[in-house]
Image: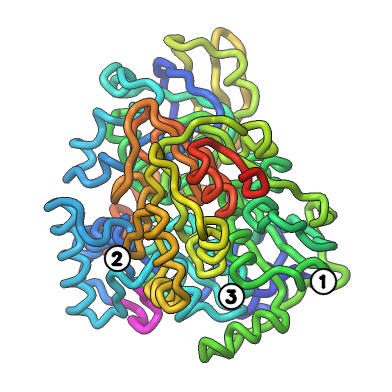
Amino acid sequence: MGMTIAEKIIAAAAGVSEVKPGDIHTVELDHLMSNDGTTHLTIDMYNKLKNPTIADVSKLVWIVDHNVPCDSVKTANSHKKMRDFAKEHHIQFYEGAGVCHQVMIENHVRPGELIFGADSHTCAYGALGAFGTGVGCTDYLYAMVTGKSWVLVPETLRFNLTGKLPEGVYARDLILTIIGMIGANGANYMAMEFAGEGMKTLSISDRVAICNLCVEAGAKTALMEVDEITLEYLKEHGREPKHSFKSDEDAHFAKVYDIDLSTIKPIVAKPHFVDSVVEAKECFGTKIDEAFLGSCNNGRIEDLRVGAEILKGRKVSPLVRFLVVPASQAVYTQALEEGLLEIFMQAGAIVMNPNCSVCWGSCQGVIGANEVLISTGTRNFKGRAGSPDSFVYLASAATVTASAIAGEITTADRL
Amino acid sequence: MEQFTGKVWVLGDDIDTDIIIPTEYLALKTVDDMKPYAFSPLRPELAGQIKEGDIIVAGKNFGCGSSREQAPEIIKALGIKCVIAKSFARIFFRNSINNGLLLIEQDALHDHVTEGEEISVTVGKEVVANGTSYAISALPQNLLDIINAGGLVKAMRKLNGLD
């Protein structure tokens, strides 16, 4: 029986020749990423163990991105705990360098790796053909101390992509369409694999946007084949694959979906669920108070270019706060060099340092009661961006920017 | 086989981790400080009403969203004996076991149970509500051992002879 990409990565990490869905395997992990969302809890638990040690410190990457710079004394103390521990144990440590998943993709992730991240959007690493999965801090601690963990081999849902996205339609619209189609738990415990001719039309940035959001369909991980586009990205970043896996011809998929990219339309996910998706036109005219362009989902240079292109020569509505947050220092620097940040600032946007920002609803830009946010962030749960009585719509960088200009939800072609 | 009864609180589908504990309260020092805000975006009064030994019954995809482990910790700290749902999101499922919170998957109960009702649970066998028995499957013994120890870290401490 052939194997899927997810099965091949688990088999390699478990040191066995074959695995099948439902099997539980002990696996060796390649990287362990943790951020300031929960690392302080991991440290507290570590200190409760008897003579604890770190199995392989070279695998650990700790990233302060959720509340950076600090928004309160409480966070400052929690960051200090993380910083001091990282220094004492020689753990690779980033602070202010960007959103954790973007930092990992730019600097660490290799195809074929099995990676645990103490953050649900770790599935983004599938864009580079790695099995990334989100875990809580106890699972993280166990992996940090032993270098290993257990995984249940997931079933795989396969998405065969053909064609090309139309002008004005983006990877974000595609993944929201898919989540709407299969539902918020449509891939619960499963892997989502993307393949087909259509992949050739999707950049690494597009691929990250797709894989990153798969957890919103409940997926354990998302995976894509390694191709020339992947290898080119890795080369630019000075890395090589660990393994370049493809699913076998006779691999078993729980379900196969065929999607023609040319049929995808601009999409909006309405409050308060990511699978509550409609065509953007159904939300036209909804007044907004804030717009957010950023996050691990859509804060890359490609997204900023899309936003800046629409904003050039226009102004942000005086009734809207438009927050622009590059996903990493590398993205920030490039946007600066390309003159994009100047376009944003001249148009009246608020450009901020790389961090998770309002996507996680604690750092900056939180919204008050009855306020409406349109966001390229990852979630629109009730209260996610601030007040429990506020409303979050999710959309592409283009739709968010167009809405920031219009003061209401719209798409760029209507400006 | 462990058996218990408890009063039921009924919640809907897709109860996400931002409902269980909103981000703004995660900076509070302890889980006990956070627990008054549990479920606050949905039902601000609920955390104050939950008593030790109560049971949550919910629809599909309970615990979807972030990997924040405070979510199962807070449910446990509120005194909830177990959560019975049509299905659980996977990160939440692992986090609950690791924190000693018992989760039970049951597809039909949610459609027939009323809030405030007393139900009885025989772990690994059945839930009885209003005279009707709903079958539940057994969790593997190693996972039950972790839950019974109060979570993975406590289980490791026990193994190490620290507790």
The image quadrant that residue A249 belongs to is bottom right
Is residue A360 or residue B141 the one in the foreground? A360
Q: Residue at x 61, y 86 (%)?
A: A241
The residue beneath circle 1 is: A2
Q: CA distance from mark 1 to mark 3?
A: 17 Å
- Among the two numbered marks 2 and 1 on one chain, the one whose residue lies closer to the N terminus: 1
Query: At 60% from the left edge and 29% from the top edge, which residue is drawn?
Result: B106
A68 sits to left or right of B64 = left
* Callouts 3 and 2 in the same chain: yes
Element type where label 3 sits in the image? helix
**Which quarter of the rendered picture does the N terminus of chain A lie within?**
bottom right
Question: Is A56 a magenta residue?
Answer: yes
Q: Nearer the viewer, mark 1 or mark 3?
A: 1
Residue A354's image quarter? bottom left
Q: Residue at x 42, y 40 (%)?
A: B17
Q: Position of residue A370 (x, y in %)?
A: 39, 26
Identify residue for label 3: A14
Kind of residue at badge 2: Val
Q: In the figure, is residue A172 to the left or right of A297?
A: right
Q: Which residues are magenta?
A: A54-61
